[in-house]
Amino acid sequence: MQLRRAAELVNSKENQNTVVYYRNKPVNIVTVDNNIGTAYVKSVNENHRFEVNLEELSEKTQSLQ
């Protein structure tokens, strides 16, 4: 995911209803670190919070091949 899109999601009301995916698992973006290109996310199902690289986030699930 691009930094700009991640920041848009965090700064809009849309974020509450937009689920992104980290390793095909649904998460919500809590904050974005512009300096190092990471996001702090919260898992939707398990309520865990952790930091990930923005490159590992997507708005669509990726098929397993």
Image: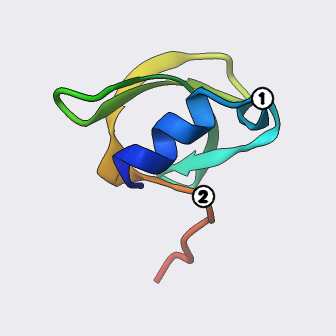
Query: What x and y, as percent, mark residue 2?
Result: 38, 54
Q: Secondary structure at mark 1?
A: helix
Q: In the rendered image, is residue 63 in sight?
A: yes
Residue that numbered label 1 is attached to = 13
The residue lying toward the viewer, choosing from 11 and 18, is 11
- Judged from this view, the residue extending furthest toward the left is 36
Numbered circle sitting on residue 59: 2
What is the three-letter code of the residue carrying label 1? Lys
Query: What x and y, as percent, mark residue 54?
Result: 34, 44
Quarter residue 26 falls in: top right
The residue lying toward the viewer, choosing from 52 and 10, is 10
Determine crowd level at label 2: few under 14, some 14-19, many 20+ residues with C-alpha closer than 10 A.
some
Quarter residue 47 falls in: top right
Label located before the other in sequence (2 or 1): 1
Depicted 28 relative to depicted 63: above or below:
above
Query: What x and y, as percent, mark residue 62?
Result: 54, 71
What is the three-letter code of the residue carrying label 2? Glu
Would you say 41 lies left or right of 56 here?
A: right
Numbered circle sitting on residue 42: none
- Judged from this view, the residue extending furthest toward the right is 17
Query: What x and y, as percent, mark residue 7?
Result: 48, 35
